[in-house]
Image (cartoon, coloured by chain):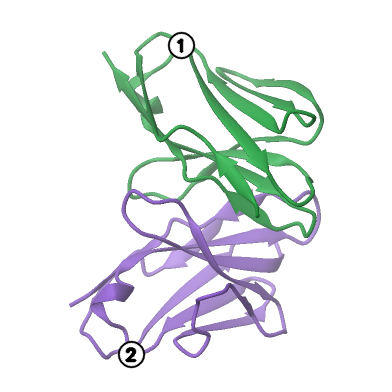
């Protein structure tokens, strides 16, 4: 079966750095997405990785290792507004998005 | 760019009635639109995939006669929850994939459905 694992919840301090991991086992791979979702709102796109390596975009970076079936989202200089759920999703061989359950990130002052 | 709207944003209806939710891509043409349902503290659950001009493809366990999907144009898809029951209360989110480009899905703001 297809499976995406990410931690259920993480806590970090304002101004710090946090890394949210995602491991996946899917039938084929056509890219990995990270989305941010605030409570009661729809997800918003953060990043898309299809090749190995690190993609940096401002305070957020996303890393992919296809051989390990592993990705992480790195958030730097954390702000209170970063408190949200972070969803990892993989595009499988049928170009269908397989979603992780999401990681709820709690930022403390 | 890549804005998706949903209407209504919030609806309360009585058990047994039907509710229609509209999803529009405002500034791009969407070959494919997706309908998701999300229960509190759970991840997105794909309900169905709809392609313009053809029948929707429903995920296992989703009743196609209960959740009617119409994708009449490249910018509009509708989801009708027929004979709604309290257990249908959920957050319904649509997303759209652009005609061109990669496989990113652009999400609408969601519709909170409460069935009393």
Residue at 35%, 12% (x, y): give it. Answer: A14
Colour of chain B in the rendered structure image: purple
- State whether residue B58 appears in this view: yes
Query: How busy is the neighbourhood of tag 2: few (under 14 within 10 Å), some, or many (20 plus)?
Result: some
Residue at 45%, 32% (x, y): give it. Answer: A7
Residue at 28%, 89% (x, y): give it. Answer: B17
In the image, farthest residue toward the front = A1
- State whether residue B2 appears in this view: no
Residue at mark 2: B83
Whether A11 is drawn above or below B15: the answer is above
Whether B75 is drawn above or below B5: the answer is below
Q: Nearer the viewer, mark 1 or mark 2?
A: 2
Quadrant of the frame with the N terminus of chain A: bottom right
User: Which label was assigned to residue A10?
Assistant: none
Label 1 to label 2, Cα distance in Å? 48 Å
On the image, the x and y values in percent for residue B20 come to 41, 81
On the image, the x and y values in percent for residue A40 come to 33, 50
Instruction: Name the one closer to the observer, A20 or B61.
Output: B61
Chain of the residue on which disc 1 is drawn: A
On the image, the x and y values in percent for residue B50 come to 65, 74
Q: Regarding mark 1 in the picture, which secondary structure is present there? A: loop
Q: Are marks 1 and 2 on the same chain?
A: no
Instruction: Name the one closer to the observer, B35 or A67.
Output: A67
Residue at mark 1: A77
Chain of the residue on which disc 2 is drawn: B
Colour of chain A in the rendered structure image: green
Q: Would residue B89 be found to the left or right of residue B82 on screen?
A: left
Residue at 72%, 84% (x, y): give it. Answer: B54
Query: How busy is the neighbourhood of tag 1: few (under 14 within 10 Å), some, or many (20 plus)?
Result: few
On the image, the x and y values in percent for residue B57 come to 65, 77
């Amino acid at each position: 079966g297809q499976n995406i694992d990410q931690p259920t919840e993480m806590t970090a301090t304002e101004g710090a750095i946090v890394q949210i991991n995602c491991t996946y086992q899917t039938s084929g791979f056509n890219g990995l997405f990270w989305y941010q979702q605030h409570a009661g709102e729809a997800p918003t796109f953060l990043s898309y990785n299809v090749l190995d390596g690190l993609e940096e975009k401002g305070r957020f970076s996303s890393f992919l290792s296809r051989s390990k079936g592993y990705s992480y989202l790195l958030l730097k200089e954390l702000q209170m507004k970063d408190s949200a759920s972070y969803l990892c999703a993989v595009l499988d061989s049928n170009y269908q998005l397989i979603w992780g359950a999401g990681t709820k990130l709690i930022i403390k002052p | 760019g890549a804005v998706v709207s949903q209407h209504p944003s919030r609806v309360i209806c009585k058990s047994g009635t039907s509710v229609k939710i509209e999803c529009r891509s405002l500034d791009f043409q969407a070959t494919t639109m997706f309908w998701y349902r999300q229960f509190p503290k759970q991840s997105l659950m794909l309900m169905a995939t709809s392609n313009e001009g053809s029948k929707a493809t429903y995920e296992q366990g989703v009743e196609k006669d209960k959740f009617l999907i119409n994708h009449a144009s490249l910018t509009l898809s509708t989801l009708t929850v027929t004979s709604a029951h309290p257990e249908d209360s959920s957050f319904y989110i649509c997303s759209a994939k652009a005609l061109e480009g990669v496989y990113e899905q652009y999400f609408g703001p969601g519709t909170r459905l409460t069935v009393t």
